[in-house]
Image (spheres, rainbow, N blue to C red):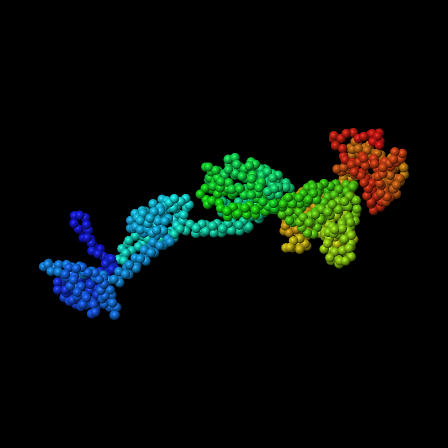
């Protein structure tokens, strides 16, 4: 395009570029001279009619253009025009290059004069067909532009609005013409306007279209934020000249809301899936609460905390929240709580919480904080009613809003979960409220399960510990160490047990047993068997007799009653009968420190191990009987003399057997670990457990080890007394002398009196020779032996009776007394505590008799 400077008035003349409006409407011109013949013929006329100037110049236009039947009328019209009249009409013509096709031209004839003053005419011709096409295109363009349901705006090259349709005006007010000359800053906030302006410039400069530009703004007079999707493209003229940028916009607010809700639903579903995988992996209250917050922050909220009832954490049977909305009134919603977990996604920001207390107080975030919520606070209401409370953030608070969600499990409110979003985050919606309730409910069930597990675990531990001997059991003539490792590390209970039972005469029963099975059921059966063993041991039965009686007890543990058991035995096979009983193995040993002799009986248990000084460990040859509960087979017992400083080990199969190696290999490794045990007994136990490949966790492990000490010879007094009256006096004399030798003078009077009673009873009711034995260890034991089988019996003597008070006197003055059967008769014994430095003087005989 070339520009030619004009006159001083500033007007600039320029040549018409190709593609101008005249090209579209196809305007041509020619002139008619005074003679009615064509004297000038323009190039556009030549193009329109397809006739060169030399072919038409000097010819009658009527004869050239018009059909023969219209020529007479045409001549008259030309005459009128030359007489000075204007004429406008439609004239058909032959379309050049199109055979048989006729065009229609609109001709405007204007009278004119030549330089000599003669009449002439100027004719302007327009192709009617081109005009109709332009009219159609304009009409359709106007229809599309004006009736479009989308906002349409045309920006000029200066980025001002050149044209807008009615839909655009309906959104931003006024009429379509009112928006001419405006810019995007008149409609949008500065950040959004700058962003759209940048896009307009880029489209204008590069010609590359921009689609789906998301713009956020507020319509005039509205408050709701709207979302618009804008498509931009550059507009060119027919000649390729840039006219501006067209923008087509649509309101996508509903689509954005739907997309946001769909994204929220997907996010919530993902959070629930994550909660299913992560919450409740441990049976610990605090860990479960932290797992909940790990899921919630930051995926669901910015701040979160969990408070649990203090009573629940301390093991109370019924937390204050029991019973949901009704039962929780016992706590009033304001019972003592402890914050067990807190999480925040707000880095380096002060915690300005919502008014959760109802008193304007700020919630302390620290875990471990013990507190109460005021009765009328939102949190207390949530706990009391078991319903979610929505708490808005206070003035100046970082918090936008908070959900106070009661944690309800099995109609029990166990605590409160709080989920907060800070200002600037997306507000909570109803979907979020439902998700918060679901998260809190899942965590509450896991926490309640953890509470129940903790309670049962504590009960199981109490049961297990009550069934095992104290950590440092003592026995006369034995140094004892023990270990117990339950196979079930989760509950710490099992079916293995060991026991150290004091028997009369400073003897000790050593017991190790194993109930087949694991867990609480095995522990309960173990407790019943252990109690039965202790009861049978106090009867001072032989080890084989103890196991026989224990076998009968084990057979009845799994049956409702003896009658039903008998009925079942009559109708079921032996294999079916075995399935109804508890099976257990057991080793029962009785050690006498005076003789250092130990008597063993075995019920299907691994053999004891003995390590003599300087020797290798040996497996004692104790006949293994059938396990307890099988029945029908007698048990054998063997006596073994144990040398001084020998080491005796009783154990369960969990120590020497696992899935990876047979019991023979385990026994060999066990013996190797026990060889030359010169270290302290506790260290020997640790060495064994650290050396053997026990595969702990597969089975329970019990280990009982005893180092043989024996009673010193000077701690035993033993006398044979003939069956004659003077033996009573002799018994008093030797007892007195022995007590003086031991430095136990304060016990002389009591011992003389009680020895006289027991020897007298042996003389009167017993048989054969009488034996008197005094044993001094941690207590003083006096035993009187005879060959009679009749057991002594205490009876209540009447006031007129001359006898019958001896055993009452023994029971009154001794710490303990009793009798037991022996292979050749019976033994009656009593026990006295050794005097300490603060002991008072023993009562005199007169004082003792005065008690009666």
Q: Quadrant of residue 22?
A: bottom left
The residue at 27%/55% (across/down) is 241
Which residue, as the protein is rendered here, is positioned at the far left? Answer: 116
Q: How many marks?
A: 0
Residue 381: x and y in percent read 56, 39
Residue 343: x and y in percent read 51, 42
* Quadrant into which the N terminus falls: bottom left
Residue 753 lies, with reference to residue 120, above or below; the image says above
Residue 604 lies, with reference to residue 53, above or below; the image says above
Q: Is residue 523 left or right of residue 233?
A: right
Q: Nearer the viewer, residue 668 or 573?
A: 573
Residue 166: x and y in percent read 34, 51
The residue at 77%/41% (across/down) is 506
Q: Nearer the viewer, residue 673 or 494?
A: 494
Q: Nearer the viewer, residue 554 or 122?
A: 122
The residue at 28%/61% (across/down) is 133
Residue 692 seen: no
* Quadrant into which the C terminus falls: top right
Residue 325 seen: yes
Q: Is residue 626 left or right of residue 728?
A: left
The residue at 29%/55% (across/down) is 236
Residue 806: x and y in percent read 85, 36
Q: Is residue 238 left or right of residue 846?
A: left
């Amino acid at each position: 395009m070339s520009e030619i400077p004009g006159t001083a008035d500033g007007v600039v003349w320029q040549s018409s570029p190709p593609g101008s409006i005249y090209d579209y409407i196809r305007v041509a011109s020619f002139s008619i001279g005074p003679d009615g013949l064509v004297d000038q013929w323009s190039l556009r006329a030549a193009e329109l009619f397809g006739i060169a100037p030399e072919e038409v110049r000097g010819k009658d236009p009527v004869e050239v253009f018009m059909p023969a039947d219209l020529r007479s009328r045409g001549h008259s019209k030309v005459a009128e025009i030359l007489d000075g009249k204007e004429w406008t009409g439609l004239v058909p013509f032959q379309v050049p290059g199109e055979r048989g096709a006729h065009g229609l031209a609109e001709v405007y004839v204007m009278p004119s004069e030549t330089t000599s003053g003669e009449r002439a005419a100027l004719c302007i011709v327009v192709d009617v067909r081109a005009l109709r096409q332009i009219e159609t295109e304009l009409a359709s363009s106007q229809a599309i532009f004006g009736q479009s349901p989308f906002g349409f705006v045309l920006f000029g090259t200066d980025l001002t609005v050149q044209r807008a349709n009615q839909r655009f005006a309906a959104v931003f007010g006024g009429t379509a013409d009112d928006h001419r000359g405006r810019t995007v800053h008149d409609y949008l906030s500065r950040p959004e306007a700058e962003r759209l302006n940048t896009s307009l410039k880029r489209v204008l400069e590069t010609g590359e279209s921009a689609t789906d530009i998301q713009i956020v703004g507020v319509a005039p007079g509205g408050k709701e934020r709207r979302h618009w999707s804008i498509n931009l493209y550059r507009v060119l003229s027919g000649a390729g000249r840039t006219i501006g940028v067209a923008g087509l916009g649509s309101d996508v607010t509903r689509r954005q809301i739907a997309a946001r809700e769909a994204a929220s639903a997907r996010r919530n579903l993902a959070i629930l899936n994550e909660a299913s995988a992560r919450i409740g992996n441990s049976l610990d209250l605090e860990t479960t609460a932290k797992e909940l917050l790990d899921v919630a922050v930051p995926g669901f909220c910015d701040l979160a905390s969990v408070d649990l009832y203090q009573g629940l954490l301390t093991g109370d049977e019924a937390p204050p929240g029991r019973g949901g909305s009704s039962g929780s009134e016992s706590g009033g919603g304001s019972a003592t709580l402890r914050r067990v977990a807190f999480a925040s996604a707000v880095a380096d920001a002060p915690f300005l919480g919502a008014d959760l207390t109802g008193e304007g107080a700020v919630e302390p975030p620290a875990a471990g904080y013990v507190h109460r919520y005021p009765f009328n606070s939102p949190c207390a209401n949530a706990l009391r009613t078991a319903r979610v409370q929505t708490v808005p953030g206070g003035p100046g608070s970082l918090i936008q809003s908070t959900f106070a969600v009661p944690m309800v499990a099995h109609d029990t409110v166990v605590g409160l979960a709080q989920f907060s979003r800070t200002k600037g985050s997306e507000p909570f919606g109803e979907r979020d409220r439902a998700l918060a309730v679901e998260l809190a409910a899942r965590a509450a069930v896991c926490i309640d399960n953890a509470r129940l597990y903790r309670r049962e675990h504590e009960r199981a531990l109490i049961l297990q510990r009550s069934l095992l001997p104290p950590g440092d059991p003592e026995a006369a003539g034995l140094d004892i160490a023990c270990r117990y490792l339950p196979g079930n590390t989760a509950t710490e209970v099992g079916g293995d047990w060991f026991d150290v039972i004091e028997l009369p005469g400073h003897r000790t029963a050593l017991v190790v047993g194993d109930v087949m099975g694991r867990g609480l059921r095995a522990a309960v059966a173990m407790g019943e068997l252990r109690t039965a063993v202790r009861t049978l041991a106090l009867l001072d039965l032989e080890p084989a007799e103890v196991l026989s009686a224990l076998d009968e007890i084990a057979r009845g543990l799994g049956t409702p009653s003896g009658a039903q058991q008998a009925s079942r035995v009559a109708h079921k096979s032996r294999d079916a009968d075995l399935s109804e009983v508890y099976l257990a193995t057991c080793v029962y040993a009785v050690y006498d420190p005076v003789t250092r002799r130990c008597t063993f009986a075995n019920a299907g248990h691994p053999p004891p191990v003995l390590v003599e000084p300087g020797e290798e460990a040996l497996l004692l040859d104790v006949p293994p009987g059938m396990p307890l509960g099988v029945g029908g087979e007698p048990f054998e017992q063997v006596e073994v003399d144990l040398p001084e400083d020998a080491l005796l080990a009783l154990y369960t199969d969990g120590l020497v057997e696992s899935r990876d190696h047979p019991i023979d290999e385990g026994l060999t490794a066990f013996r190797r670990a026990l060889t030359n045990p010169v270290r302290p007994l506790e260290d020997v136990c640790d060495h064994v457990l650290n050396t053997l490949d026990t595969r702990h966790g597969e089975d329970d492990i019990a280990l009982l080890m005893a180092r043989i000490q024996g009673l010193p010879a000077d701690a035993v007094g033993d006398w044979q007394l003939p069956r004659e009256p003077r033996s009573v006096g002799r018994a008093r004399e030797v007892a007195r002398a022995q007590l003086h030798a031991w430095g136990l003078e304060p016990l002389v009077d009591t011992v003389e009196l009680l020895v006289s009673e027991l020897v007298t009873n042996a003389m009167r009711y017993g048989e054969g020779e009488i034996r008197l034995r005094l044993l001094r260890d941690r207590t003083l034991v006096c035993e009187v032996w005879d060959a009679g089988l009749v057991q002594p019996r205490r009876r209540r003597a009447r006031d007129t009776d001359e006898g019958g008070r001896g055993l009452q006197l023994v029971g009154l003055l001794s710490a303990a007394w009793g009798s037991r059967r022996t292979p050749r008769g019976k033994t009656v014994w009593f026990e006295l505590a050794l005097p300490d430095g603060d002991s008072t003087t023993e009562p005199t005989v007169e004082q003792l008799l005065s008690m009666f």
